Image (cartoon, rainbow, N blue to C red):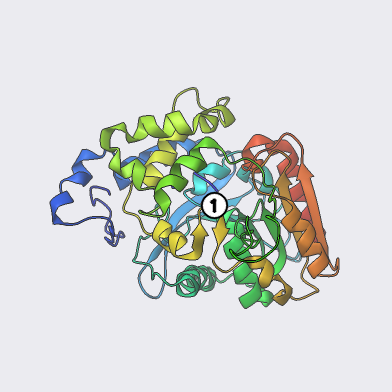
Amino acid sequence: MDPATTIPTAPMQNECETESSPIWNWWPSWRPTSMSLLKTTESKILACIQNDLWARFVTLPNQDRIWTLTLTKKAAPKPAEQAPKTPLVMVHGFGGGVGLWIRNMDVLSRSRPLYAFDLLGFGRSSRPPFPSDAAKAEEQFIDSIEQWRQSLGLENMILLGHSLGGYLATSYAIQYPSRVSHLILVDPWGFPERPQAETQEGQDQRTEVVKRPPLPRWVKVIAAVVSLFNPLAVIRAAGPWGPGLVNRFRPDFKRKFEDLFEDDTMTQYIYHCNAQTPSGEVGFRAMAESLGWAKRPMLQRVHQLPPSMPLTMLYGARSWVDSSSGDSVVQIRNQAHTRVILIDDASHHVYADQPEEFNRVVEKICNSVN
């Protein structure tokens, strides 16, 4: 998993605070956050970008808005006869936003247009209600991605998704295969089925021992409340102590970007992304069996990807996400156009832990497309 109401300052925001009731109407002013503060913090991050950047909202037919970045290399126009390169589209994970790609966007936009957007219900995108049914919640995410693509007029794309973004990117590629030239999944969430630690009572069988990577402390803390509340409710419930809570449980985010920001810019960004009105996390909760498992595991559906669609799965060698799911995908697809790559000395956030190697691998994949 990854890290995600507000004083309603942004007209694009649809209020859907599912945890609130009239007695809690005073909470938004108690939390030191707003869409304006999120915008300010994100602007500080995006100021690091050297290439040409276009940041704007893309309005969908239902009037939801998707916060979108487009990056192109600062260079003279290329000859008209040269075919345009297939754009790279980057989809962040749970609780994230476009700012987390700050170590990657300049490099990966050197040879082709790069698009990064905040998933519906996350970051600065609209925050509509999500259904409690897993399939319907997933479909709402996928519909928004397809409508976003149509609004931008993208015919094809190299689609890269991290964690929850990897799960949704796979679902999108299954439904709209003609739009995906290469699917890149980075430590994707929601692939394996949830293991049964014990056999059913009454059966004369021994208990199965299930081995899995140890979960980070912050995951365990969130898991303790996820069955009762939305996954990141604790950040909002903490009120003015919310930013300190993020700093305490996610100090790694400050370390990952400390050469770019000496202060708490990145943890502040994480806080402001996730202290807003819950929306996308409501959709995530609907799709999740528990924090680490999907109700509709993607390994059960990955065979629906066209065999001809190239698929690369990148895992951090030190991630708590088990890379054996990648090996299972290779077997399911009969090794057709499927690769699994482990990035040494990288945890779940591969793109931030080992950005040079991540960028090198992704750029090589992109160049193999055109």
Q: Residue at x 40, y 75 (%)?
A: 61
Quarter in which the C terminus is drawn: bottom right
User: Which of the pair 273/328 is nearer the observer?
Assistant: 328
Quarter of the image holding residue 241?
Answer: top left
| Mark 1: amino acid | Gly
Q: Which residue is mark 1?
A: 93
| Residue 11 vertical placement versus 171 (above, below) | above
Q: Residue at x 73, y 74 (%)?
A: 303
Can you give x and y, in whole percent of width and height, for residue 212 in the image?
Answer: 67, 47
State how many labels appear: 1
| Residue 139 vertical placement versus 237 (above, below) | below
- Left-right relation of 27 to 165: left
User: Which of the pair 189/221 is nearer the observer?
Assistant: 221
User: Which of the pair 293/164 is nearer the observer?
Assistant: 293
Can you give x and y, in whole percent of width and height, for residue 183 in the image?
Answer: 70, 63
| Residue 192 vertical placement versus 1 (above, below) | below
Can you give x and y, in whole percent of width and height, for residue 91 in the image?
Answer: 57, 56
Quarter of the image holding residue 205?
Answer: bottom right
Q: Residue at x 37, y 74 (%)?
A: 62
Q: Residue at x 54, y 52 (%)?
A: 93
Q: Residue furthest right?
A: 335
User: Which of the pair 93/146 is nearer the observer?
Assistant: 93
Classify mark 1: residues with Cα within 10 Å, few (<14), some (14-19) or many (20+).
many
